[in-house]
Image (cartoon, grey):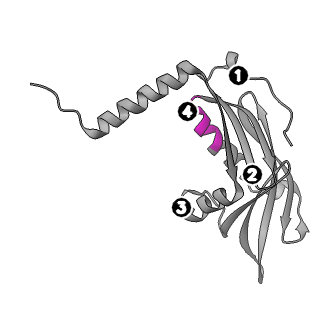
Amino acid sequence: VAATVTPAQETDAMHGQYAQMLRALNPTMTFAVTAANINAYLKTRPAELKMPEGFKAPRVALTRGIFEISARKNLLFISTRVRVGLAPRVVRGRLRLKVARLHAGPIPLPAHFHLGVAKTIEGFVNAILERNEMQLLSVEVEKQVVRVTARVAPNDAAGAPEATPPTQ
């Protein structure tokens, strides 16, 4: 009796072959994503975001060297936008984010008030890199675009690139 292959099994097999091919080729890929694309993604997938209690309407702004994420928050009797500016760098093939600035409206706040947003974003991005056996090589933030370069390769400490300085 011949076994029947379902469309889902065919798709899984094709993805497996594609993944094997990528690992064998060891390509380096560069992705460019605009602030508009990121904001459209954030707007259509609010359930996937791990927003702290009371924050809503997340938005991203990209300026030279800084990835800024903001969200609306009611503080006492006013609604304001809380903004966290993050400076990306690559350490051993993984994303690391440093809080460069933090504001509630026009008022600067101490960096430790960021509620873990840097670690949350790092965890999200690094989990995708791990799942796809990719090593991050560079992150460049320019006005309204972020460019990410990564290499497809099995994740092992011996093959991971050394720490690189923050990219501007």
Q: Locate residue 126 relative to residue 78 in the image: left or right.
A: left
- Which of disc 3 and disc 4 is earlier in sequence? 3
Looking at the rendering, which quadrant does residue 97 occupy?
A: top right
Please tell me whether mark 4 sits on a helix, a strand or a loop: loop
Instruction: Say if mark 2 contacts mark 3, CB within 8 Å.
Output: no
Q: Nearer the viewer, mark 2 or mark 3?
A: 2
Secondary structure beneath disc 2?
strand
How many residues crowd around disc 4 within 10 Å: few (fewer than 14), some, or many (20 or more)?
some
Q: Nearer the viewer, residue 41 or 104?
A: 41
Q: Kindly identify the amino acid type of the residue bearing the numbered disc 1.
A: Ala
In this rendering, which labeled residue sits more in front, label 1 or label 2?
A: 2
Residue at 78% over, 67% down: 82
Q: Amino acid at mark 3?
A: Ala
Q: Which residue is mark 2?
A: 145
For mark 1, give the secondary structure.
Answer: loop
Q: Position of residue 17 (x, y in %)?
A: 42, 26
Residue drawn where x is 35% and y is 36% of the image: 11
- Pinpoint residue 4: horizontal percent, then vertical percent: 18, 32
The reply to whether callout 4 and callout 3 are in contact (CB within 8 Å) is: no
Disc number for residue 118: none
Q: Which residue is mark 1?
A: 160
Q: Which residue does the numbered mark 3 point to in the structure image? A: 47
Q: Label 4 is placed on what type of residue? A: Asn
| Residue beneath disc 4 | 132
Q: Earlier in the sequence, mark 1 or mark 2?
A: 2
Q: Tell me the kind of residue under disc 2.
A: Val
Q: Which residue is at 30% across, 35% downward? A: 9
Residues at marks 4 and 2 touching, judged by CB atoms closer than 8 Å: no
How far separated are the C-alphas under marks 3 and 1?
33 Å
Determine whether 17 is above or below 90 in the image: above
Magenta range: 125-133
What is the quadrant of the C terminus in the image?
top right
